[in-house]
Image: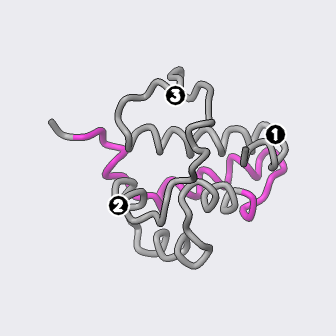
Amino acid sequence: MPGHRIFATSFASVYPLYVQKAERKGRTKAEVDEVIRWLTGYDQAGLERQIVAKTDFQTFFADAPHLHPRASLIKGVVCGVRVEDVDDPLMQKIRYLDKLVDELAKGKAMDKILR
């Protein structure tokens, strides 16, 4: 069975949307990068390489140095779905990222976002 179409979507095509969402609410690109690095273990250079390479989400997470050990503490609803209830591991990682960006855009303190 083929995966969801987001799996083959370029991370680089979605990344600017994350930044725009955060900036509309007074947050910064640097903060978006910080939450992405926290979740995935990429350093800034590694994150930028993934963006330039137009890596799809499946490869982006497969190549990530490590998922943060406290990522499972990310709870809540994204697009009407509870992130902790998502069965597919890749989709759950994508939803974790969506939730972190949502929390950032909603003005949550960085120390609370990064658990």
Pick the residue in front: 85 or 58: 85
- State which region is magenta: 3-31
Left or right, residue 31 beside residue 87: right
Q: Earlier in the sequence, mark 1 or mark 2?
A: 2
- Residue 33 in the image: above or below residue 88: below
Determine the image quadrant of residue 48.
bottom right
Residue kind at label 1, given as amino acid type: Lys
Specify few, some or many for label 1: CA neighbours under 10 Å numbering under 14, 14-19, or 20 or more: few
Residue kind at label 3, given as amino acid type: Glu
Q: Could you say where residue 1 lies in the image, as x and y percent from the top left?
A: 15, 36
- Label 3 SS: helix
Specify few, some or many for label 2: CA neighbours under 10 Å numbering under 14, 14-19, or 20 or more: some
Residue visible at 67% across and 55% down in the picture = 35
Label drawn at residue 59? 2
Pointer 3 residue:
84
- Label 1 SS: loop
Residue kind at label 2, given as amino acid type: Thr
Q: Could you say where residue 112 lies in the image, as x and y percent from the top left?
A: 79, 42
- Residue 81 in the image: above or below residue 9: above
Pointer 1 residue:
108
Residue visible at 35% across and 61% down in the picture = 59
Residue ranking furthest to the top: 80
Q: Earlier in the sequence, mark 1 or mark 3?
A: 3
| Contact, mark 1 vs mark 2 (Cβ under 8 Å) | no
- Label 2 SS: helix
Pick the residue in front: 13 or 67: 67
Q: CA distance from mark 1 to mark 2?
A: 29 Å
Q: Could you say where residue 5 lies in the image, as x and y percent from the top left?
A: 31, 42
- Residue 92 in the image: above or below residue 62: above
Determine the image quadrant of residue 109.
top right
Verify whether residue 105 appears in magenta: no
Q: CA distance from mark 1 to mark 3?
A: 19 Å
